[in-house]
């Protein structure tokens, strides 16, 4: 009959297979695919595998076309970077559409999902007294909750997470299996019956002697504690709330690690925290209940609120609403009038770190309190955030009065991210990431103009360490991993690198290192691995070039605190020319004049040494006779002849030279008497930025450029003259920033394209003034990748991509 009269049921459906990659695991993608398939009358299946998501779809042509279109509008937390589909012969006919078990069938390319802040649906359930998860601290769904911090391996399935030890109860399992549930295939689904539970411990000295606890994961340690001390699980939240109301300092376990918290309106508690943590002035962030509370203490516009409320839930550096009098006494009573003691939280600064609750536990805490909380990473300065109770006891047992924690392990510690809003007119960038960590994906991209089949890694810098891994056309930038001057950070760095390399079955062909001979990463290079060295500031420039896909000649303006130069001096005030025709090279167009770090590394902490050095450079030996608080401070601490001793050191040939703008900021800060010794990196510059009058009329100080060397000595003379004439310090600080912007404009006058990078461009005032001075230029900023040393590994990875791409084009 040639098919005439053939029944409709015997006509074979069309069959297509789909391959989707990107952020498609741990974000509710398979349930989305399932529901989309049902809506469009599609049969087949969807499953996670090591490459991402695989879909086999059967149906009519029109239904398949509609299904294909609908797939390209996934849940908000998902991000599709690769979407491919093709028709295949119909062999097996599927009666319905299902979610299949995950497969591990090929080399991994799936993206490690980021931790996601609590969604509005879960928040409503958390606060609904009629909901079975009312008040449950670990509520989550496919749209929110821990991901990166909980995962041990890919694919993202429950068995590969810290939730593996928690078997779902019947109600949770029913939700997991129900296609109409928001928790359909939610891998971390749980409730009070079957999930993690809270513990509260005080009297920590009783635990500190039990050193066998120190190395145990929280899951095992909690089993022991609960059997020996069942009271630890009795009303833990209520006990923590009461302790905070009584001015206690607590360690609080979160998604990626522990934070230290206390009442942000209680000056005594804040002073005690600073005393115990040996952190005199480094600023703290505050956790606010909501926007209403946050706006009492910071100026927030609509875009800033959007950043705070994003799934990444970072700490936002915002303009503080400072009181008129900035000389508050710690004995002043703030609690009654809800006034924030800014000078104790962020001393000498006009910015304030704000964060909103991003876990159910945070909401339960802040909703029971009528004050904000100090919110700072629980760690020893420079070390990674602590992820287990044993380490809290070992390292911070004498810092906190109590610990609120739980029996779910954190596999991968991760800090809170730190961002600043770009409030610059006519710029497309809305946000500058200063610390890329919790909430931001590791999966990023490099320009496609230089592809390479090689696997390689950029190992970053010593401070703000990150690494950047390239394999099979995939780029992964690690989260912020701390400073590598200590063993804990080094162990965290190697753990995270091994996690990435093991998960993606990556055998590295080469690596890129900083030129600095003493950077710890040199000890991490595997034997026989091909190693390339990339100058620090060139890596900064390449990071900006890669982020912005710059394919034209560009002048890089790289200002930071320190970086090992090719001449073995310390660079940091660099103008580097880059040409895409010779992408592995740069020319040093100009730089700041050298000055000495008197006493070497001591000058980075005791910045009076930098202040006296720039005076020596400007006034020679006459500096000793000047009447300045800086000089009096040195004579008081050391002896009346210390200035002569420093001058001899200045004249010596055995001294460390630098041309760093970051160190010049420190020197001017000391010269103005606003900071003599730094408590944290960049403090001197941050104080100058905060001090500068924001709406004043700036005046440029004189400077000279000779043989492409910027002579800053006239600036120092002019600042000294202003100090003698009692010009207000806010005006001097503004003038100094403005002068740096004018120097940039002068050097860049013949360059149409400019790229700004280096830690000094975290300074919002310097960035704004520079953009105004370069208003007729195309200026590229770093926004998604930190412009500080957290972006160095990204620049190194781009160097390797360019290197291997050129090699492969010559020898295909």
Image: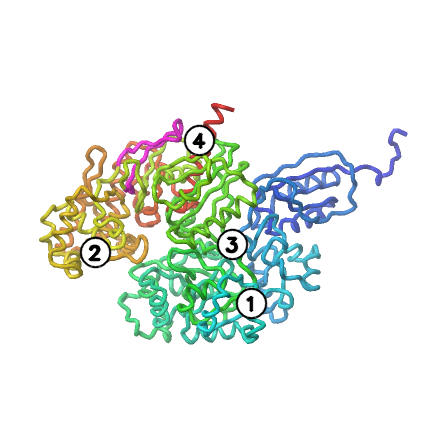
The percent coordinates of residue 390 (x first, y second) are 48, 64
Q: CA distance from mark 3 to mark 1?
A: 19 Å
Q: Is residue 425 left or right of residue 721?
A: right
Please report contact status of discs 3 and 4: CB closer than 8 Å, yes or no.
Answer: no
Q: Secondary structure at mark 1?
A: helix
Structural crowding at the residue carrying mark 4, measured as other residues with C-alpha within 10 Å and reported as few (<14), some (14–19) or many (≥20): some
Name the residue tied to disc 3: 412
Residue 691 location, x and y as percent? 26, 56
Q: In this view of the protein, which residue sits in the foreground, 229 or 727?
A: 229
Which residue corresponds to the image point at 53% horizontal and 32% vertical from the top-left? 453
Magenta stretch, residue numbers: 570-590
Q: Is 104 on the left or on the right of 810, as rendered? A: right
Instruction: Mark 3 or mark 4: name the one nearer the start of the chain.
Output: 3
**What secondary structure is marked by label 3?**
loop
Mark nearer the N terminus (3 vs 2):
3
Q: Residue at x 14, y 48 (%)?
A: 647
Task: Decide which of tag 4 and tag 1 comes sooner along the chain.
Answer: 1
């Amino acid at each position: 009959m040639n098919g005439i009269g053939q029944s409709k049921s015997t006509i074979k459906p069309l069959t297509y297979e789909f391959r989707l990659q990107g952020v498609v695991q741990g974000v509710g993608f398979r349930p989305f695919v399932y529901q989309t398939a049902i809506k469009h009358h599609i049969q087949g299946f969807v499953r996670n595998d090591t490459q991402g998501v695989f879909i086999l779809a059967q149906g009519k042509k029109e239904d398949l076309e509609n299904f294909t279109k609908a797939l390209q509008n996934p849940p908000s937390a998902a991000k599709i970077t690769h979407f491919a589909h093709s028709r295949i012969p119909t062999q097996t006919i599927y009666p319905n559409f299902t979610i299949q078990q995950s497969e591990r069938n090929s080399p991994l390319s799936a993206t490690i999902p980021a931790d996601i802040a609590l969604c509005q649906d879960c928040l409503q359930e958390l606060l609904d007294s009629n909901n079975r998860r009312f008040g449950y601290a670990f509520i989550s769904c496919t749209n929110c909750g821990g991901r990166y911090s909980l995962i041990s391996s890919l694919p993202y399935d429950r068995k590969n997470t810290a939730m593996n030890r928690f078997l779902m109860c019947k109600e949770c399992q029913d939700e997991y299996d129900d296609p109409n549930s928001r928790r359909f295939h939610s891998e971390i689904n749980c409730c009070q019956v079957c999930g993690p539970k809270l513990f509260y411990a005080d009297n920590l000295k009783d635990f500190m002697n039990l050193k066998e606890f120190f190395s145990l994961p929280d899951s095992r340690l909690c089993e022991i504690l609960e059997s020996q001390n069942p009271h630890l699980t009795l009303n833990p939240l209520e006990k923590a709330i009461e302790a905070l109301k009584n001015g206690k300092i607590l360690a609080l376990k979160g998604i990626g690690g522990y934070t230290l918290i206390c009442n942000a309106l209680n000056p005594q508690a804040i002073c005690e925290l600073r005393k115990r943590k040996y952190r005199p002035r480094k600023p703290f962030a505050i956790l606010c209940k909501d926007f209403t509370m946050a706006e009492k203490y910071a100026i927030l516009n609509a875009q800033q609120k959007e950043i705070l409320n994003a799934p990444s839930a970072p700490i936002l550096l915002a303009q503080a609403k400072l009181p008129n009098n900035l000389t508050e006494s710690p004995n002043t009573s703030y609690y009654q009038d809800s006034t924030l003691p800014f000078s104790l939280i962020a001393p000498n600064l006009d910015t304030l770190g704000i964060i909103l609750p991003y876990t159910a536990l945070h909401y339960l805490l802040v909703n029971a309190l009528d004050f904000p909380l100090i919110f700072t990473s629980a760690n020893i300065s420079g070390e990674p955030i602590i992820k287990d109770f044993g380490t809290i006891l070992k390292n911070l047992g004498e810092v906190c009065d109590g610990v609120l924690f739980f029996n779910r392990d954190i596999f991968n510690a991760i800090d809170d991210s730190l961002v600043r809003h770009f409030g610059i007119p006519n710029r497309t960038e809305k946000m500058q990431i200063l610390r890329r960590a919790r909430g931001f994906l590791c999966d990023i991209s490099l320009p496609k103009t230089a592809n390479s089949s090689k696997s390689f890694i950029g190992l970053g810098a010593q401070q703000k360490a990150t690494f950047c891994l390239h394999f099979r056309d995939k780029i992964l930038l690690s989260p912020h991993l701390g400073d590598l001057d200590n063993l804990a950070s080094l162990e965290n760095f190697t753990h995270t690198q091994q996690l990435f390399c093991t998960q993606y079955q990556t055998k590295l062909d080469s690596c890129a290192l900083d030129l600095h001979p003493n950077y710890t990463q040199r000890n991490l290079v595997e034997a026989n691995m091909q190693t390339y060295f990339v100058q620090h500031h060139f890596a900064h420039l390449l990071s900006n070039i890669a982020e912005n896909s710059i394919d034209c000649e560009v002048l890089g303006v790289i200002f930071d605190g320190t970086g090992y130069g090719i001449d073995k001096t310390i660079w940091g005030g660099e103008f580097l020319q880059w040409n895409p025709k010779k992408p592995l090279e740069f020319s040093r167009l100009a730089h700041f004049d050298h000055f000495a770090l008197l006493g070497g590394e001591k000058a980075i902490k005791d910045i009076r040494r930098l202040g006296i050095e720039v005076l020596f450079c400007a006034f020679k030996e006459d500096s000793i006779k000047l009447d300045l608080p800086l000089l009096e401070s040195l004579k008081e601490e050391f002896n009346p002849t210390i200035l002569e001793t420093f001058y001899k050191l200045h004249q010596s040939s055995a001294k460390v030279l630098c041309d760093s703008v970051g160190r010049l900021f420190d020197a001017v800060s000391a010269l103005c008497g606003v900071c003599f010794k730094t408590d944290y990196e960049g403090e001197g510059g941050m104080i100058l930025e905060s001090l500068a009058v924001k709406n004043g009329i700036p005046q440029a100080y004189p400077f000279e450029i000779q043989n492409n060397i910027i002579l800053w000595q006239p600036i120092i003379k002019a600042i000294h003259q202003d100090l003698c004439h009692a010009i207000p310090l806010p005006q001097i600080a503004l003038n100094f920033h403005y002068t740096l912007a004018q120097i940039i404009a002068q050097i860049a006058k013949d360059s149409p394209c400019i790229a700004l990078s280096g830690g000094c461009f975290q300074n919002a005032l310097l960035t704004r003034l520079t953009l105004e001075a370069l208003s007729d230029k195309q200026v590229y900023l770093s926004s998604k990748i930190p412009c500080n040393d957290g972006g160095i590994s990204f620049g190194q990875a781009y160097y390797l991509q360019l290197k291997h791409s050129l090699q492969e084009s010559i020898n295909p």
